[in-house]
């Protein structure tokens, strides 16, 4: 028994899971630090095992070793001899930990690997490594060691905006399986040595039980499980197929599967704003030569932790290449719009963005690729294409509502999704929202007051050292420190607008940027979040609660229509009077009389406001059931096809008898009447005819099939005449009479012959895997020239013989026919009953 | 003759064979009741140019079978009763000095016959037993440096008592391997035994037996058997089967390549006796136990469990897949 194997495998397993943390950090310094600590734990464990120490020794010593390692790695300066922890060095570590916590509060992933964060990460990984070592090596409960590893694995899954890519998952899963395999083998070896009798009389010393075979089947189960875990979600219609091939995509294709893959857009935004470099994200030219906010996401769901969007739906007919975008939700026919045409060029470096930055509301987009618009939010996205390097033209009709229209707008009673607030919000925020909007009569006035409160009256300070837009961050922001950046401003205003009864959502994107050399240039620091509020008849309007200018979001602009107006001021007649004329001018043909189908729809059917609800659950369930049904029917259908093909081949002189025989064999397999591998055609015919008492005609048919096959195989000349389709049919009917109705149905749905073939195919694939995997161990084993582990098949069998159990001991590999034969025996008895 | 030659070539020998074999069988079965399997196997071995080992307890008709076969064919038959003091020269023959011609003259031993019946072969010393070796395999005898060819067809039918019995020397592996097949007679069925009492009670039926076939006829049959077609899958099956005995963990010694040869040869005869001009796996399966089992040495564990080689062969037949493709 190799005492080093388990501790080392435990270390490797932890390291495999640690790799999945990679996308959380910038740079790899943290990784080497973590590998170091894993090495320390594994080495301590290995030494303890080697010395045969009691199980509690390693868990007691390893933390000390970890502390020494951390001291040497992080606070060597203060330490005695650079490694022995002193009070100073401990204080240093504590300070670093504090820094690390602060930094983590501040940064969104990927975080810079500064010492504090690295220390925290390393300590966390050390804890996991200790637990894995404790469970797997000391307590010998390798399966339990999966729990701490799973805990580590969930960190990137929970924090990262993108789902974890499948290669990372596979690496982590292999680490765990490796641990299980090693543990299983150690357990088997604990059974002791074999007494070996050899025919040749050669020396047979040091033979250990042959665990090779068992490990092989273990690995096969493991590999199959992993492959299924990766493939099945990709195949199932209810889940987004994308994560299979993107190393985490974040396209937010939630339309098909709930919230899977929705990016934590806000977390990403914070990361962008805090970047030191201010790279150019995109440039654009505009026909009206004015800056336009470019929206990427519209987040309409506030779940208390963050803002996110409801499932998108990109229907094929909503491809932007098909024509104008879907109608603007809520925009009434009478509202004048300002048309502008923009040409946008996206930087090549923009990574993994599958949503087009567009002005709202975009009317027409001319971009290469399969871009589709979501009807509710007018977000334009693609499941396949990325925006990086894209050059596209977009036409926008920004509404230019008069104050009259705005003032008369009311909140719609059925806009509930955009008013929904999570439970557990601080009631004081609600009270504050009421207070701020008190005295305002219309939703519009309330909105303006809110914006004014954020920008002027509330005493807010712009600072990037803030984080979060969840419930807790909200109350901290509006009730206590009133310090934050666009994320907090936009989130807070949207939430408070909802509290005040105005449908609201948070948009993420970029501000209009600044004009450089005649083109509008948008950089990383122009990343922005802003609230959009819904007014009936006008639709969604942008508001800007974030302070602009040097002390705030540099290029943010307060929209014209939100300039504060005195509540007592009379509505100015100007803009509203010229409304319809404006409309004619700016929108051109189709403008004034353009109906708004959405609105009509909504009114006639009373469905939810703007947001496309996505596929209804019932439809999803139906699709799922249909998919499952199709999967269920596949084997039976495949079998039917095969039978058809064989019957067709029967007619041909060349393959006729053979096809009949193959069909007969498959029929017998399906019916559970198959014989042993050593059964000759003649013996099979005899057995079937006798056991199932076929009627004379069927027996004759059977004899024809059997004789033809026999002659074809073994006689010098092929048979003169072969069986015909009717023969097969007769045999099948005769045999089926011996099955119960349920058995017949089962046979039709899940024909054993087809399933066996699928299994054989899978085993073939696994064999290839085994061969690849066994290449290296074989070599090293040969070099070690230790006792023949798996090299001698006999050692295993003889091992069995030393126990009363006889050669059927646990290490004997059953011969190919053994278990199959036994299984068949069972089915046969089953049928007889 | 009105029949065209090529048609006769293809079918007539086979029909002749079946017919002649039938006659011989009937003749033997008039002496040995209720043992048609054994008789058929005996004929198979004869047509396969092999040698037969009959093992069973005394008094079940081993010698009777051997003699009946010999009698039914009109050919020289010699019988050797093996005893512990039998010498090799008693079997092969001896060169004696002829006083008149003043030359050494070879006096042929009992092996110079078409059918040699070796009774209780395992009672002789190993030295004498091995004197049979050369005869059986090479169909020749070498005495004093001179090699004499044996008759053709040549068949040794040896009987032996189970090795547990007193005064027996077990046959060495090498010699066992030279026998194509080993069969056990087994006790007769009560009905057959009853009939035997009627037939054998008054007279010795063996005395009344008339030969039903000539040597030339048997030689022609053997030629016909050689022409029986063995397809590639069947050959592969034979090889697979024998290979399985070599890799079985329950066996200390598997079957030799000679066993493969004997298996296919006797399968030809078996097929021909069924009137078929090609071998099917069923032929091999029917013959596997008598042809293979006596060559196998069970491992110590298997011996400890009193498992017989016959069981292993039967197990193997179930397991080794029948090849199906050409």
Image (cartoon, coloured by chain):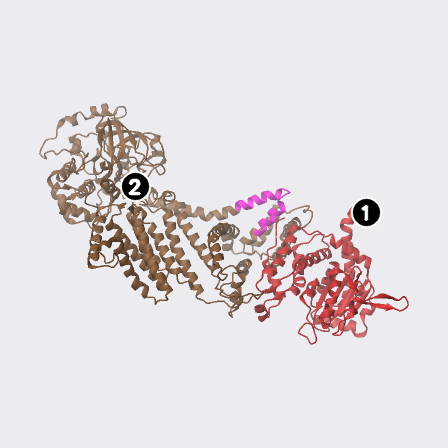
Chain colours: A brown, B red
Residue placed farthest to the front in the image?
Answer: A81
Question: What secondary structure prevails in the magenta region?
Answer: helix
Residue interval drawn in magenta: A640-665
Mark in the foreground, 2 or 1: 1
Q: Position of residue A191 (x, y in %)?
A: 45, 67
User: From this viewpoint, is residue A587 visible?
Assistant: yes
Q: Circles 2 and 1: CB distance less than 8 Å?
A: no
Observer-nearest of A344 and B297: B297
Where is mark 1, residue-wise? B3
Residue placed farthest to the left in the image?
Answer: A568
- Under tag 2, what secondary structure? loop
Residue A594 position (above or below residue A670)? above
Q: Position of residue A45 (x, y in %)?
A: 34, 61
Where is mark 2, residue-wise? A613
A430 vs B260, left or right, is: left
Q: Position of residue A425 (x, y in %)?
A: 19, 49
Q: Residue at x 54, y 62 (%)?
A: A794
Q: Chain of mark 2?
A: A
The part of the image, by quadrant, that contains residue A288 is top left
The part of the image, by quadrant, that contains residue A568 is top left
Residue B198 position (above or below residue A395)? below
User: From this viewpoint, is residue B39 visible?
Assistant: no
The verdict on residue A645 being magenta is yes
- Under tag 1, what secondary structure? loop
- Quarter that holds the N terminus of chain A: bottom left
């Amino acid at each position: 028994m190799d005492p080093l194997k388990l501790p080392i495998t435990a270390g490797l397993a932890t390291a495999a899971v640690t790799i999945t943390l990679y996308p959380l950090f910038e740079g790899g310094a943290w990784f080497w630090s973590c590998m170091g600590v894993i090495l320390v734990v594994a080495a301590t464990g290995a030494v303890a095992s080697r010395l045969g120490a009691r199980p509690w020794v390693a868990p007691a010593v390893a933390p000390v070793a970890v502390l020494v390692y951390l001291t040497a790695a992080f606070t060597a300066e203060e330490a005695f001899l650079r490694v022995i922890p002193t009070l100073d060095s401990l204080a240093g570590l504590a300070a670093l930990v504090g820094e690390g916590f602060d930094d983590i509060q501040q940064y969104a992933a990927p975080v810079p690997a500064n010492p504090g964060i690295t220390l925290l990460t390393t300590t966390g990984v050390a804890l996991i490594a200790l637990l894995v070592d404790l469970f797997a090596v000391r307590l010998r409960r390798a399966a339990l060691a999966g729990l701490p590893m799973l805990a580590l694995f969930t960190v990137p899954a929970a924090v990262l905006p993108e789902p974890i890519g499948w290669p990372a998952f596979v690496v982590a899963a292999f680490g765990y399986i490796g641990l299980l395999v090693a543990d299983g083998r150690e357990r088997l070896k604990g059974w002791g040595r074999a007494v070996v009798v050899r025919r040749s009389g050669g020396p047979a010393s040091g033979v250990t039980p042959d665990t090779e075979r068992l490990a092989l089947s273990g690995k096969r189960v493991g590999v199959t499980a992993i492959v299924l875990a990766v493939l099945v979600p990709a195949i199932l219609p209810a889940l987004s197929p994308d994560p299979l091939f993107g190393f985490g995509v974040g396209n937010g294709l939630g339309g098909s599967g709930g919230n899977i893959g929705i990016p934590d857009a806000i977390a990403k935004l914070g990361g962008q704003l805090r970047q030191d470099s201010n790279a150019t994200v995109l440039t654009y030219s505009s026909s009206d030569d004015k800056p336009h906010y470019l929206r990427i996401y519209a987040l309409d769901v506030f779940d208390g932790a963050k803002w996110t969007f409801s499932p998108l739906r990109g229907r094929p007919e909503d491809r932007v290449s098909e024509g104008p975008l879907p109608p603007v939700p809520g925009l009434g026919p009478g509202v004048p719009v300002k048309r502008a045409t923009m040409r946008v060029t996206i930087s090549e470096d923009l990574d993994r963005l599958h949503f087009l930055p567009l002005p709202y509301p975009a009317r027409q987009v001319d971009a290469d690729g399969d871009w589709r618009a979501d009807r509710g939010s007018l977000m334009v996205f693609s499941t396949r294409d990325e925006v990086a390097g894209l050059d596209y033209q977009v036409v926008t009709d920004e509404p230019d509502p008069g104050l009259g229209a705005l003032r008369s707008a009311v909140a719609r009673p059925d806009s509930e999704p955009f008013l929904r607030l999570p439970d557990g919000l601080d009631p004081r925020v609600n009270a504050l929202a009421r207070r701020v909007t008190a005295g305002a009569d219309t939703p519009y006035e309330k909105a303006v007051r809110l914006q004014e409160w954020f920008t002027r009256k509330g005493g807010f300070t712009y600072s990037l050292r803030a984080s979060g837009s969840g419930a807790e961050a909200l109350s901290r922001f509006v009730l206590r420190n009133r310090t934050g950046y666009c994320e907090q401003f936009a989130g807070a205003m949207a939430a408070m607008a909802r509290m005040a009864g105005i449908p609201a959502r948070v948009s993420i994107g970029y501000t209009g940027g600044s004009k450089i050399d005649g083109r509008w240039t948008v950089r990383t620091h122009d990343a922005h979040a802003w609230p959009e509020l819904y007014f009936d008849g006008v639709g969604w309007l942008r508001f800007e609660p974030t302070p602009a200018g040097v002390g705030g979001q540099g290029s943010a602009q307060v929209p014209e229509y939100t300039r504060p107006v005195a509540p007592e001021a009379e509505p100015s007649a100007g803009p509203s009077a010229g409304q319809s004329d404006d409309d004619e001018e700016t929108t051109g043909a189709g403008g004034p009389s353009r109906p708004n189908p959405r609105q009509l729809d909504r009114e006639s059917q009373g469905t939810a406001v703007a947001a496309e609800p996505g596929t209804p659950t019932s439809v999803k369930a139906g699709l799922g059931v249909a998919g499952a049904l199709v999967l269920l029917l596949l084997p039976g259908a495949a079998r039917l096809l095969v039978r058809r093909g064989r019957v067709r081949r029967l007619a041909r002189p060349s393959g006729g008898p053979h096809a009949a025989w193959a069909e007969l064999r498959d029929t017998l397999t399906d019916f559970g009447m198959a014989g042993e591998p050593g059964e000759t055609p003649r013996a099979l015919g005899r057995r079937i005819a006798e056991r199932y008492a076929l009627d004379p005609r069927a027996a004759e048919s059977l004899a024809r099939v059997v004789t033809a096959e026999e002659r074809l195989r073994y006689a010098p000349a092929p048979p003169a005449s072969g069986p015909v389709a009717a023969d097969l049919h007769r045999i099948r009917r005769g045999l089926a009479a011996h099955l119960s109705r349920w058995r017949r149905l089962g046979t039709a749905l899940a024909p054993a012959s087809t399933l066996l073939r699928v299994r054989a195919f899978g085993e073939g694939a696994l064999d290839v895997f085994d061969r690849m995997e066994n290449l290296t161990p074989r070599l090293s084993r040969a070099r070690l020239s230790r006792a023949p582990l798996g090299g001698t098949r006999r050692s295993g069998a003889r091992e069995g013989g030393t126990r009363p159990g006889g050669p059927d001991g646990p290490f004997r590999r059953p011969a190919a026919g053994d278990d199959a034969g036994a299984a068949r025996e069972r089915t046969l008895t089953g049928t007889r009953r | 003759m009105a029949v065209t030659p090529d048609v006769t070539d293809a079918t007539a020998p086979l029909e002749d064979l079946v017919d002649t074999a039938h006659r011989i069988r009937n003749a033997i079965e008039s002496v040995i009741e209720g043992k048609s399997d054994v008789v058929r196997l005996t004929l198979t071995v004869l047509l396969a140019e092999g040698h037969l080992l009959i093992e069973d307890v005394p008094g079940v008709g081993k010698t009777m079978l051997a003699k009946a076969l010999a009698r039914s064919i009109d050919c020289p038959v010699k019988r050797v009763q093996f005893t512990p003091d039998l010498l090799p020269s008693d079997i092969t023959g001896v060169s004696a000095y002829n006083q008149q011609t003043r030359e050494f003259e070879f006096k042929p031993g009992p092996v110079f016959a078409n059918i040699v019946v070796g009774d209780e072969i395992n009672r002789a010393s190993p030295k004498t037993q091995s004197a049979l070796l050369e005869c059986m395999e090479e169909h020749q005898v070498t005495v004093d440096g001179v090699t004499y060819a044996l008759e053709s067809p040549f068949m040794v039918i040896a009987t032996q008592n189970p090795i547990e019995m007193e005064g027996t020397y077990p046959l060495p592996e090498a010699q066992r391997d030279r026998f194509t097949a080993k069969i056990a007679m087994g006790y007769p069925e009560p009905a057959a035994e009853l009939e035997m009492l009627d037939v054998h009670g008054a007279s010795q039926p063996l005395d009344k037996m008339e030969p039903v076939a000539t040597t030339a006829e048997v030689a022609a049959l053997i030629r016909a058997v050689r022409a029986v077609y063995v397809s590639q899958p069947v050959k592969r099956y034979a090889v697979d089967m024998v290979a399985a005995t070599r890799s079985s963990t329950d066996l200390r010694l598997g079957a030799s390549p000679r066993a493969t040869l004997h298996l296919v040869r006797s399968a030809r005869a078996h097929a021909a006796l069924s009137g078929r001009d090609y071998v099917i796996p069923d032929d091999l399966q029917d013959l596997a136990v008598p042809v293979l089992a006596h060559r196998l040495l069970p491992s110590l564990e298997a011996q400890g469990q009193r498992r017989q080689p016959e069981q292993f062969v039967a197990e193997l037949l179930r397991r080794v897949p029948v090849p199906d493709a050409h």
